[in-house]
Image: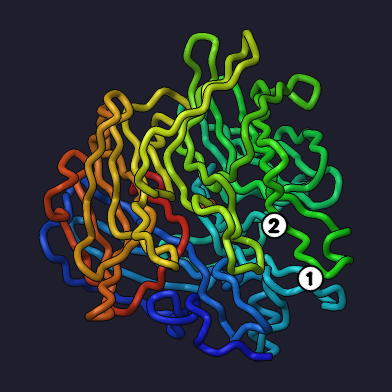
Amino acid sequence: MTITATNPYLKGNFAPVRKEITSDTLEVIGHLPPELSGMFVRNGPNPQHSPIGQYHWFDGDGMLHGVRISDGKATYCNRYVRTTGWKIEKQAGKAIWTGLLEPQQTKVPHGISKNTANTALVWHAGQLLALWEGGAPYVIKLPDLKTVGEYTYHGQLTSAFTAHPKIDPIIGEMMFFGYSFEPPYLQYSIVSAEGKLVRTVPINLPMGVMMHDFAITENYTIFMDLPLTFSAKRAQRGKSPIMFERDRPSRFGIVPRYGDNSSIYWFESPSCYVFHTFNAYEEEDEVVLIACRMSSTNVLINKDTQLDPEGDIPRLHRWRFNLTDGTVREEMLDDVPAEFPRVNENFLGQKTRYGYAARMAGSSEPLVDGIIKYDLSNGKSQTHEFGEGCYGGEAVFVPRPGSTVEDDGWLITFVHDQSSKTSEMIVVNAQEMTTEPVARVLIPQRVPYGFHGTWVSEEQL
Ligand SMILES: [Fe+2]
């Protein structure tokens, strides 16, 4: 069965674009700050062919949209991540792999799943990696967004690679994990600042779970063993192999950065799901985690009915894990639905005062209608609204070069106007959230709604 445009993720601004373009002179409304020099790159799904069976938003082939900014001018290009699967399907002229909502294929000669590299990006040790949590990263060349190829740390990579690795801003080393539905269910790795994969250890879990993100502090790494579980037995009975088991608790594992399974300490709290963490830090006897918590999720399950009225609604929460007495305190920090949290990554793992997240519009599809700036010191927030009929995505915080003030910088995201069907990249002064963007860069073609982006500074380029 070939799916038609009845799927909401193949319509409107979720629909893929067909052309890869390069545009050297973009119109700018307002002024690009002269200190803002580098490249904003965002990843997201853009299916090359009509999908086989049901399409899930997470299934599409990765496409990168990049805006290079220099001397107050901007250029744009968009390119597919030319993964192995993308090339095979390009040659075939049609889709070969099914997606998340269809039974897993066992007879595809090229492997049971396609690494789409569609989720996120990280710049580390002098290279840009496009990430997908089920497989290896792909190296991307800048500024032309050419795919160099799959990257396995010279064969040292023994697991999948999360879309959300964490870089210690002081030391420069990168922590990542890979999860699997077969033992070992979780592996935890460290890459040195120079880019050498120096350490991989298994972490024991009772069963396979979907683990999208984690967090670091100065001395600890925090894993989230949440009850979105995988069971082959369920699949054999014709049910969805992935299920949210609301009777199982949430488990948070805190391990010293260079620790292993013998030094991890697990905390339990009521069942929930978290796609993304904001940040984590240490305070006296506690490790503090801030993340967007949902009381349950059907996001990855082939089921339209969400029995939990609060299910799939992400809200900012804080957990305090006391390493001395073993207690957990969990509290909601804001009741406004928000996702795609980001901080000034120069302060990752330290106590941050500010955080930024995408405000969810409350629509049936995950539309984002503004950027919230939280002040965690007083519980207040300010919102930059995109305006009537305009929706965006994750906002990436770009620190002003040389500044040590946490919120001194800009927030960058793509925004789409659903009435004019045009897209732009906006630059918002993070200290003046409620004023107009300092610059709006008009993009000559539609930029579909997507996932995560990153900023690569002039220095890094
Ligand atoms: Fe993510």
Viewer can see residue 237: yes
Which residue is pictured at 32% across the width and 57% down the height? 413
Q: Nearer the viewer, residue 333 or 394?
A: 333
Q: In this orientation, which residue lies closer to the viewer: 19 or 389?
A: 389
Q: Is residue 330 left or right of residue 187?
A: left
Query: Which of the pair 288/136 is nearer the observer?
Result: 288
User: What's the residue at 46%, 85% (across, down)?
Assistant: 18
- Answer few, some or many: residues within 10 Å of disc 2's Cα (few below 14, many 20 plus, some between 14 and 19): some
Q: Disc count in the image? A: 2
Q: Residue at x 42, y 72 (%)?
A: 78
Precedes in sequence: disc 1 or disc 2: 1
Identity, as a three-letter code, of the amino acid under mark 2: Gly
Residue 134's tag is 2
Residue 208 is left or right of residue 77, and the answer is: right
Closer to viewer: mark 1 or mark 2: 1
- The spot of residue 345 in percent (x, y) is 41, 36
> Which mark is on residue 104?
1
Q: Which is nearer the eye, 425 or 305?
A: 305
Q: Is residue 64 left or right of residue 215?
A: left
Task: Tell me the SS state at disc 2.
Answer: loop
